[in-house]
Amino acid sequence: MKYILSLDQGTTGSRAVLYGEDGKPVAIARRDVKQIYPRRGWVEHDALDIWNNQLDAARSVIADSGISADDILAIGIANQRETAVIWDKGGQPYAGAVVWQCRRTSPMCDSLKEEGLEDYIYDRTGLKVDPYFSATKFRWLMDNVPAIRANVAGGNVFIGTMDSYLLYMLTGCRVHATDYTNASRTMLFNIHELKWDSGLLSLFRIPKSVLPKVYPSGHLYGYTTPELFGKRIPICGIAGDQQAALFGMLCTRAGDIKSTYGTGCFTLMNTGNRNIISKRGLVTTLSACVDSRPDYVLEGSVFSSGAVITWLREGLRAATDDAECAAIAQSLSDSGGVYLVPAFVGLGAPHWDSEARGTIVGITRGTTREHIIRAAQESAAYQVMDVLRALQADTGIKIDSLNVDGGLSCNDFVMQFQADISGISVVRPVVKESTSLGAAYLAGLTIGMWDNIEQLRDNKQAEKIFTPDMDKVERSKFILGWEKAVRQTVAK
């Protein structure tokens, strides 16, 4: 038996998953990622700490499975997107990594909008002007960390997203590269010409020399240094986590759609060779592919999904674990008219309000802890519903079913409410590790473990399908209440 080692570097944890030839996980190891909050609205990670815990997870999963590194054909990497890292030749970060959730560059984004540059940027990148994306983070670091400015001219500055940093460290500081999917999230990459955009580099004052080379997601990027695992292992796949999940669910045809419920929630639809101009707050990005031109993808990003459940547990201390949250929600017939809009770090698609903050509306004297717990879980489904409606309107494609994965997809209450409030079927797969599976598929196809995508479709199985079971009148009432709550949140 041969294996693919998938490194899934996420916002709250770094995981390593070993996949066999049947596409099923053999062993998993996870290490937590420390969240750093220097100021209100700022979020950072320690990139060097992430490298160390990702390496530790990889070594642990190999040791725990009892296999030899000789049995690993290749490594695939999936990563949290948009998080900005700047480091030196030796791999030492100059500063904390600025996380995708961080809102410190809101003033910079406001200035770009005031200068009328939104259309200019969107036409090239498919992205909204928002602190979510990497370009303003890179610029902020270069403006505010003197050591970066001092070393740019000397060739001792390397800029990238988390995948680039991990690749650099895995290859012994030899390879500085990324893939189309991650590059497409920086707000510096021309998604039509598939290259760093000279006009945008000039606008953000970022020299091309400090940026990584860009390749398809399935590509031989380089080899690990022997001392890491006892042998050189080829690194043959890289993709941003959401595109990796899209590939892991084999959504490779136009119209295929998935939603990943992690810290945030990200709904992506493959639109093939159609570059659809969204009129409803969605962004266009690129799909993962193996040595070919990538498809276009229309995406709606929700910033706080699983983060709401974490807040219930750790912030409010309203429940001890996710299972208790789900049980409480299921014990009620409804949320008692309470709606929670979790704009903890602003609102993403389709609203794009970086200054909005969380709101709870509909509280009465009869409101209980249980009502708030249920409303918090319902908020994940409501936000995805908003994105699904925008996708249908922008593409003209009727959505009948939704492929789901991620931690919150294991919550039966949320998935059933998603089906009910959206009026569609929700399909949860047997293998829920779609992000790491996508990275493994990319690496395995590139190295030759699998011949083609069609061969992989035999591995795809549904664990459970949730079908809508809500009266249309009741659904409309709930949706009107949600829309009113969102208006009140945005109005702030």
Image (tube, rainbow, N blue to C red):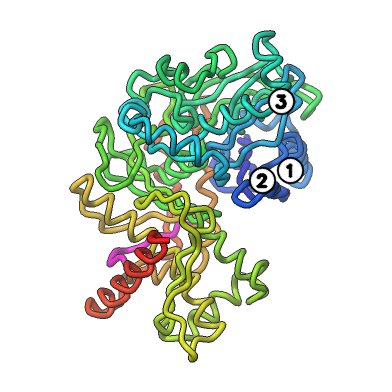
Q: Count neighbours of disc 3 (C-alpha within 10 A) and say few if under 14, some if 14 to 19, many if 20 or more.
A: many
- As drawn, 89 above or below 388: above
Q: Position of residue 126 (x, y in %)?
A: 35, 33
- The quadrant of the rendering that contains the N terminus is top right
Residue type highlighted by circle 3: Met
Q: Is residue 470 left or right of residue 346?
A: left
Image marks 1 and 2: residues in contact by CB distance under 8 Å: yes
Give the spatial CA distance, label 1 vs label 2: 6 Å
Q: Give me the residue at 69% from left, 8% from top.
A: 154
- As drawn, 109 above or below 197: below
Q: Which residue is mark 1?
A: 57
Q: Which residue is mark 2?
A: 15
* Region in magenta: 422-429
Residue type highlighted by circle 2: Arg
Secondary structure of residue under mark 3 = helix
Can you tell which mark lies on residue 218?
none
Dominant secondary structure of the residues highlighted in magenta in the image: strand
Secondary structure of residue under mark 1 = helix
The one nearer the camera, 202 or 449, is 202
Q: Mark 1 or mark 2: name the one nearer the start of the chain.
A: 2
The image quadrant that residue 125 belongs to is: top left
Q: Mark 3 or mark 2: name the one nearer the start of the chain.
A: 2
Q: Give me the residue at 49% from left, 23% from top.
A: 204
Can you tell which mark lies on residue 169?
3
- As drawn, 486 above or below 85: below
